[in-house]
Image (cartoon, rainbow, N blue to C red):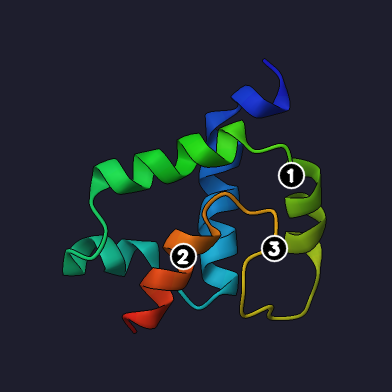
């Protein structure tokens, strides 16, 4: 299975980018701001994204970013969730 097909990897990338943005996806689901279907769609978009290597580098950095990388397929969704905080 290639890097694009690794569901676990993309689950953690999605959560990691959200965390870097200050978005707690578990809390968003608990609060009703994000459904399980929305979260599954986010992981699917991540799996289809061509920027996986860039995300791995981005997430390995030590600085708190505050925003998703420009190429992130979930950038708009995460920005919207952050605005709800």
Residue at the image point whose x is 26% and y is 41% from the top: 37
Circle 2 Cα neighbour tier, 10 Å, few/some/many (<14 / 14–19 / ≥20): many
Residue at the image point whose x is 77% and y is 61% from the top: 58
Residue with the most extreme top position = 1
Q: CA distance from mark 3 to mark 2?
A: 11 Å
The residue that mark 3 highlights is: 69
The residue that mark 2 highlights is: 78
Query: x, y (%) of residue 83?
Result: 38, 81
Lateral position of residue 77 relative to residue 18, left or right: left
Mark 2 lies on a secondary structure that is: helix
Circle 1 Cα neighbour tier, 10 Å, few/some/many (<14 / 14–19 / ≥20): some
Q: Of marks 3 and 2, which one's residue comes earlier in the chain? A: 3
Q: Dividing the image into 4 quarters, which one contains the N terminus?
A: top right
Against 64, residue 77 (above or below) is above
Query: x, y (%) of residue 40?
Result: 36, 39
The residue that mark 1 highlights is: 51
Rendering quarter of residue 61: bottom right
Residue at the image point whose x is 72% and y is 61% from the top: 59
Rendered image: mark on residue 82: none
Q: CA distance from mark 3 to mark 1?
A: 9 Å
Residue at the image point whose x is 29% and y is 69% from the top: 27
Rendering quarter of residue 6: top right
Q: CA distance from mark 2 to mark 1?
A: 16 Å
Q: Of marks 3 and 1, which one's residue comes earlier in the chain? A: 1
Q: Are marks 3 and 1 in contact (CB under 8 Å)?
A: yes
């Amino acid at each position: 299975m290639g890097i694009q097909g690794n569901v676990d990897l993309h689950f953690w990338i999605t959560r990691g980018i959200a965390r870097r943005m200050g978005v707690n996806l578990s809390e968003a689901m608990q609060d009703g701001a994000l459904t399980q279907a929305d979260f599954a769609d986010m992981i699917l978009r991540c799996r289809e994204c061509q920027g996986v290597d860039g995300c791995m580098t981005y997430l390995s950095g030590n600085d708190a970013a505050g925003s998703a990388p420009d190429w992130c397929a979930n950038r708009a969704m995460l920005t919207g969730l952050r605005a709800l905080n």
